[in-house]
Image: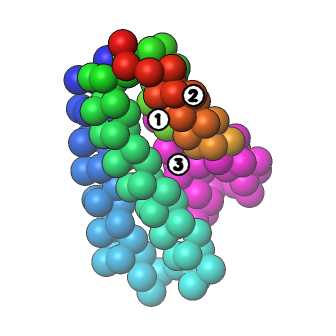
Amino acid sequence: MAQTFLILGALFAAVGVGAGAFGAHALRGRLSAEMLAVFETGVRYHLIHALALVAVGLAATRWASPAVGLAGWLFCAGVILFSGSLYLLALGGPRVLGAITPIGGAAFIAGWLILAYGVSLGPT
């Protein structure tokens, strides 16, 4: 489990940096200020939760409860649903995608709460 989340965190971080560079260089001037801000919000949460996945990978070496693993998968889901929906919205996707964004946000919140619970169980 630890290795999986360390690898996923590193891969998500690489994609997040790429998305940020794409937004800064290819989208500036092509998107409205509002849509560029939406894209940048997606990048910010993407990168924060890529680092959270690395933290989950490290935490899993000491607290190997199923809750820690669940937190990692919730962070993955959050990046895909929250950041992914914001990227698509900013790039002209259908407005209905906005209904997906809060589901990703809820996955982030649940991930943090479940990570706290998993660590509170003590080392395994």
Q: Residues within 10 Å of mark 3 (few under 14, many from 20)?
A: many
Range of magenta residues: 76-105
- Badge number at residue 84: 3
Q: What amino acid is at disc 3? A: Gly
Dot 2 or dot 1, earlier in sequence: 1
Q: CA distance from mark 2 to mark 1?
A: 18 Å
Q: What amino acid is at disc 1? A: Cys
Image quadrant where residue 3 sits: top left
Dot 3 or dot 1, earlier in sequence: 1
> Which secondary structure, mark 3?
helix
Q: Is residue 37 magenta?
A: no
Q: Nearer the viewer, mark 3 or mark 2?
A: 2
Q: x%, y% of residue 46?
A: 44, 53
Q: Residue at x 34, y 30 (%)?
A: 59
Q: Which residue is mark 2?
A: 117
> Tags 3 and 1 in contact by the CB under 8 Å rule?
no
Q: Nearer the viewer, mark 3 or mark 1?
A: 1
Q: CA distance from mark 3 to mark 2?
A: 27 Å
Q: Residue at x 44, y 61 (%)?
A: 43
Q: Is residue 111 left or right of residue 19?
A: right
Looking at the picture, does residue 122 appear above or below residue 94?
above
Q: Is residue 101 magenta?
A: yes
Please identify the quadrant where the C terminus is shown: top left
Dot 3 or dot 2, earlier in sequence: 3
Q: Nearer the viewer, mark 2 or mark 1?
A: 2
Q: Which residue is mark 1?
A: 76
Looking at the picture, does residue 111 appear above or below residue 4?
below
